[in-house]
Amino acid sequence: MKNQRLLAVLTLTNLGLLILLLQSHVRPVLANTVAPVIRGRALEIVDEQGRVRASIKVQPAETFAPTGVKYAETVVLRLIDADGRPEVKIAASVQGGGLSFVGDSDTTQVKLGAHGAESSLQLTNQDGRQELVKP
């Protein structure tokens, strides 16, 4: 009988300690807490179907094989439509920065850029008409 009482007391004590420990570790998650910095190599935002709709990436320095043009390391922000086409791009490198918008076809574009000592605004319509503005 004494063993049963001792076991019951020990069981109740363990149960009380378990409840106390769980209460001290379980806290509500508050949405108003802010992490001071989020770090990573890239950021992608996806829609409900898992398609990437926005991304920020650091592209390594490379040479574009078809033209032989060398590009410096570049940070690129892309906003992508539901069909997977980048509609807005913002890019920055040591050579300069650029901003581009694409219309409903790849030929309809607005490009604003500063490369080295030059800047330009290029407007292109779907029919191929183009206007280039340079200071």
Image: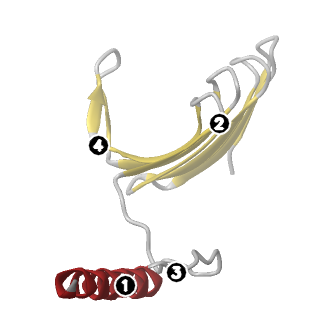
- Is 42 positioned to the left or the right of 83 in the image? left
Identify residue for label 3: 27
- Is 134 positioned to the left or the right of 37 in the image? right
How far apart in space, not on screen, are marks 1 and 4 (Cα)?
49 Å
Identify residue for label 4: 60
Residue positioned 42% across, 82% down in the render? 19
Q: Nearer the viewer, mark 3 or mark 4?
A: 3
Residue 111, x across and y down, in percent: 67, 38
Amino acid type of the residue that numbered disc 2 sits on in the rendered structure: Asp
Q: Earlier in the sequence, mark 1 or mark 4?
A: 1
Residue positioned 79% across, 21% down in the render? 104
How far apart in space, not on screen, are marks 2 and 1 (Cα)?
39 Å
Q: Earlier in the sequence, mark 1 or mark 3?
A: 1
Residue positioned 17% across, 83% down in the render? 3
The correct choice, above or below, for 39 with respect to 23 in the image is above
Task: Determine which of the numbered discs, if any, sits on residue 21 in the image.
Answer: 1
The correct choice, above or below, for 66 with respect to 33 in the image is above
Q: Earlier in the sequence, mark 3 or mark 4?
A: 3
How far apart in space, not on screen, are marks 3 and 2 (Cα)?
30 Å
Q: Residue furthest front?
A: 1
